[in-house]
Amino acid sequence: MEKVTIDDVESRMSAADVRRGLSDDLKTSDMAINYYELAPGDSFAFGYHAHVGQEEVFYIQSGSVTFETENGDVLVTGGEIVRFAPGEFQRGVNHGDERVVALALGAPRDSELDEMRRDCAECNKRTANTLEMADSGEELVTYCLECGAETGRFD
């Protein structure tokens, strides 16, 4: 058995105000577990994305999240759970005024990101993006794969 106090796990750079990866501390072998706190405007992910071979489940403890999906937007509120099949595109954003607290579970634990898409001002459309560490080592930066323009910075 493994037990973790969420507040004792260090938060990582993310598109969310707080993202604590719990998998290592819990020593999970087959499941990724992440704790999130989203301030208004924050997202679980750096962009609209899908994972190859991994299903994701989000439990929204409090607040509300709007998930952009291939079939339109889906609102998920406190006490609700949503599942995304492997390869299914999605992005959850806190469009509300209150903080969101949530758990994200993914299986299998290690999965590649199939594709991440973000709005590119240079291309004037949503394009595939890559995520890299900034030279300072203090931010993550997304870049358009079509033109190389920076599309976002996250700390």
Image (cartoon, rainbow, N blue to C red):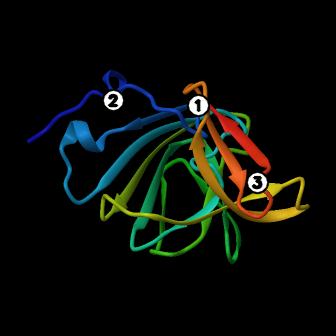
Q: Which residue is mark 2?
A: 6
Residue for point 58% across, 37% down: 16
What x and y, as percent, mark residue 136?
60, 24
Q: Nearer the viewer, residue 33 or 110?
A: 110
Q: Secondary structure at mark 2?
A: helix
Q: Which residue is mark 3?
A: 148
Q: Quadrant of residue 29?
A: bottom left
Cα distance in 3D space between marks 2 and 3: 37 Å
Q: Which mark is residue 103?
A: none
Residue flagged by tag 3: what amino acid is it? Gly
Cα distance in 3D space between marks 1 and 2: 15 Å
Residue for point 45% across, 74% down: 86
User: Which class describes the residues within 10 Å of circle 2: few (<14), some (14-19), or many (20+)?
Assistant: some
User: Which class describes the residues within 10 Å of circle 1: few (<14), some (14-19), or many (20+)?
Assistant: many
Q: Quadrant of residue 128?
A: bottom right
74 above or below 47? below
Q: Earlier in the sequence, mark 2 or mark 3?
A: 2
Which numbered disc, 1 or 2, marks the residue closer to the eye?
1
Q: Farthest residue toward the left?
A: 1
Q: Earlier in the sequence, mark 1 or mark 3?
A: 1
